[in-house]
């Protein structure tokens, strides 16, 4: 069973930065894609960014130019560097891995980490 463990959330002032990390347990994982999602109070969970093992990235329009997703495949880890944070970025952030097991893809979620942007 693959488990994802996130870290790096917290309270930051507007304009500040945070770096989130998510590491997947297990070895020889066949990762298809890794990503970050977020869910603000009263809103649906939304995609923030994704990255493939080869390094292809996608971003939500709302975070382009401010957030950067990266990965360390050897360590089964994905990062989200968040700069120029705004109050609208306040949410619980979840990492998400799509992993191939035999011939079937499975989706795994982290437990979530709170990011609060407030003065």
Image: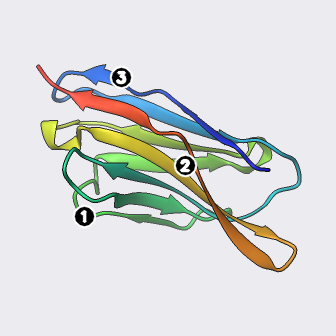
At label 2, counting other C-alpha atoms closer than 10 Å, the crowd grade (few under 14, some 14-19, many 20 or more) is: many
Q: Nearer the viewer, residue 113 or 89?
A: 113
Instruction: Locate residue 85: give its quadrant.
Output: top left
Q: Tag 3 or tag 2, which sits nearer the N-term?
A: 3
| x then y, percent, for residue 48 | 37, 56
Mark 3, residue position: 10
Q: Nearer the viewer, mark 3 or mark 1?
A: 3
| x then y, percent, for residue 15 | 18, 29
Say which residue appears at 21% left-offset and 44% top-offset: 41
**Relative to 6, 17 lies left or right:** left
Q: Nearer the viewer, mark 2 or mark 3?
A: 3
Mark 1, residue position: 61
**Disc 2 secondary structure class:** strand
Residue at the front extreme of this rendering:
42
Label ID, residue 21: none
At label 3, counting other C-alpha atoms closer than 10 Å, the crowd grade (few under 14, some 14-19, many 20 or more) is: some
Mark 2, residue position: 70
What is the spatial separation of the Cα atoms under label 2 and label 3, in whole angstroms?
20 Å
**Disc 1 secondary structure class:** loop
């Amino acid at each position: 069973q693959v488990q994802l463990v996130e870290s790096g959330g917290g309270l930051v002032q507007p304009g500040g930065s945070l770096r989130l990390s998510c590491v997947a347990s297990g070895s020889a994982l066949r990762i298809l894609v890794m990503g970050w999602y977020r869910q603000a109070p009263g809103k649906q969970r939304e995609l923030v960014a994704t990255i493939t093992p080869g390094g292809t990235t996608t971003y939500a329009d709302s975070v382009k130019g401010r957030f950067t997703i990266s990965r360390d495949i050897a360590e089964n880890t994905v990062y989200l560097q968040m700069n120029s944070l705004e109050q609208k970025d306040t949410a619980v952030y979840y990492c998400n891995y799509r992993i191939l097991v035999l011939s079937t893809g499975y989706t795994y979620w982290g437990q979530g980490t709170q990011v609060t942007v407030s003065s």
